[in-house]
Each structure stands twice: as C-alpha cells, then as structure tokens.
Amino acid sequence: MNVIDSRTDRTSQVIQSRVFEPLAKASPVLEAHQTQLGIGPYKIDAVVGRAQETWLIRNRVDPLSVGHVVPDPNLLAFVVPVAWRGEYHCNGISASASTLYIASGPDGYSTRGAGRDYFSIGLNRDRFVRSLAALEGVEPGEIHLHDGALYLPPLSMIRMRRILGACLTELSAGSGCHHTRQAVIAERLYDVMLEAYMAGTPLTSMRVPLAKSYERIVRTAEEHFMEAEGAPLSLADLCRATGVGRTVFYEAFNSVYGTSPLNYFKKRRLMQARTALAMSRPDETKVKEVALSLGLTHLGRFSTEYRNLFGETPSVTLGSPDQSRS
C-alpha cells in the first residue's frame, strides 16, 4: 500500500497510466485488479486524495473492463458513479444516476463497465459507525452497516457529486492543503456520506443472496487462478476448486463479470502480460520471457490476441515509457 503521508502537505497524487498497477499501489487496498474485456488501448486517469484518515479518489477507466477491489478492513468504502457508456454494474447491480454503492463486507466490490468515471471514498469504519450511532441515538454495537446499493433522490446525488468534486479539487490544489484544512475537508466528507447513508433507500431483491453466492464462486476461482502462477488450468479444475458444476460456474461469471470464465481468464492473463511489459525495461526484459512466465506458451497466438485486444503488439508496450516504470 503506497500511502500519501498526511503529516506533509502532499495530499494528492495524479495517475495517468496504461496499466492499473500504479493506482492499486497508491490506494488503501488489500487487493485490486482490473481485466480489460473491450478492444482498444487501456488507460486510466485518476486523482488520489487524502485528508488525514479519509480517502477520496476519482477514477476514469476505458475501455470496457471488469475489476475487483478489497479495501483496507479499517475503511468503509463507497462508490459513486458519475458517468459511463452502456451499462455499469457494481456487484452485479446496474448503476443509475441515483445509485450509491457501499462495500462494508470483507469481500470488497466488483465493477464492470466502459468509459467509467466514478468517485471512490474510504472512511474510517469505527469513526463512521460511532457518528452514525450518535445520530440514530443507539450504541455503536447496535449498528449493522448496509452492504450493497442505495437509492438517493437525483438532486441529492448531484449535490453529493458536487461536494466530492470540490473536496478533491482543494486537496489537489498546488502542493496540497494545510493540516487544519485537511481536517475540515475530512469532516465534510463524513458529513456528506453520513447524510447520504441515512437518506438512502436500500436496493434489495430476491437476487441479492444469489448474487453474493456468485461473487464467492468468482472470488474462489480467482484465488485458484492466482495460486496456479501461470500453470495451465482447465474448466474442470476451476469447477472442482469452487465446488460447483459447469452451469452454475458459467452463471456466476456471467452475473459478476458479464462474460464467460474462459474468456475472462484468458484476458486476465493478457492483462498480466501487459502490466509486466509496461513496468519492465526493454533492455532488461524480453517479450518471450514475460509470456512464458504466465503460461502463454503459444507465442504467435499470444502476440495476435494481445494486438487484437490492446491495439498494439507486446513489443510496442515494452518499448514505450510509462509512469509505472521505475
């Protein structure tokens, strides 16, 4: 976790990259990854801001991609969509102009969409619970945080987005803002998110338990995929690891990521290759070495699929400078 030090005036970081890794390193997360599904050059444009113990991030990601984030367990995470193309889903729930997402559980949240522009907010969980309990006149132990989507009236969402944008602009101004001003901004963020939480209407349906079950299946499959470290994996291997049959396994991936498991993991491998190439130096690394390390043994097919997905060859990615490269 790459933390922006709140003891200094550096309260923001601008990230523009062709890979997701720099944003993941700059954010308060235990785990984060993105997998590109749409065709075209992947790009991320983000501003990461911090006011004391409070995080405010604005992300712009293109093209169509899916991702999963597990925040620091000390934080309560909110996702506020701003704009997108086509459909935008968070934990399998379609976004609207009035939808706010809360990730209070240990599994984090998954997103899917193209041209996504959204705010991520991280607030200290204990402080939020204490403040919420005081407002509701109960003990903190009686608070059970919602985990999912909330509906807010359109004007309330517009006001919230405006406040979030103003706070991030102030954190990004010059070299940052003074510690006293950081405290004011942090308090403002708690106020606006507490207000939204209390005013929001939970979006629940009979599909919610099923959606959470699908998310667990996908998470287990991804863990098995990472543990394989490039070794070949069959559909049967992944079904055994998750303890479900082929039909349910496909339903889970289509629900969470909108694509088949085989297509997802193929593009996940290509995304891993892109990250490795973009973060390596051409005088120290060869495309073949990266491909083989990820189990991509058919080099001609790898090069073709890579170019079809990202719009450039692996060697072009390796030879182009990126801010993620040390």
Image (cartoon, rainbow, N blue to C red):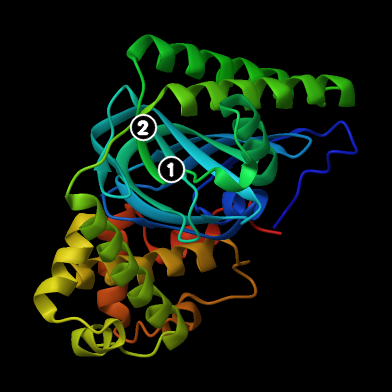
Q: Nearer the viewer, mark 1 or mark 2?
A: 1
Q: Position of residue 232 (x, y in %)?
A: 32, 89
> Which structural element holds mark 2?
strand
On-image quarter of the N terminus: bottom right
> Which structural element holds mark 1?
loop
Residue 54 visible somewhere in the drawing: yes
Query: Is label 1 in contact with label 2 (beta carbons under 8 Å)?
Result: yes
**What residue is drawn where x is 82% and y is 19%?**
181
Q: Looking at this rendering, what residue extends furthest in the left direction?
A: 247
Type of amino acid at the residue the image marks with label 2: Leu
- Horizontal side, residue 324 vs residue 7: left or right: left
Q: Position of residue 321 (x, y in %)?
A: 60, 52
Type of amino acid at the residue the image marks with label 1: His
Q: Position of residue 41 (x, y in %)?
A: 37, 47
On residue 25, the disc is none
Residue 174 visible somewhere in the drawing: no
Residue at numbered disc 1: 146
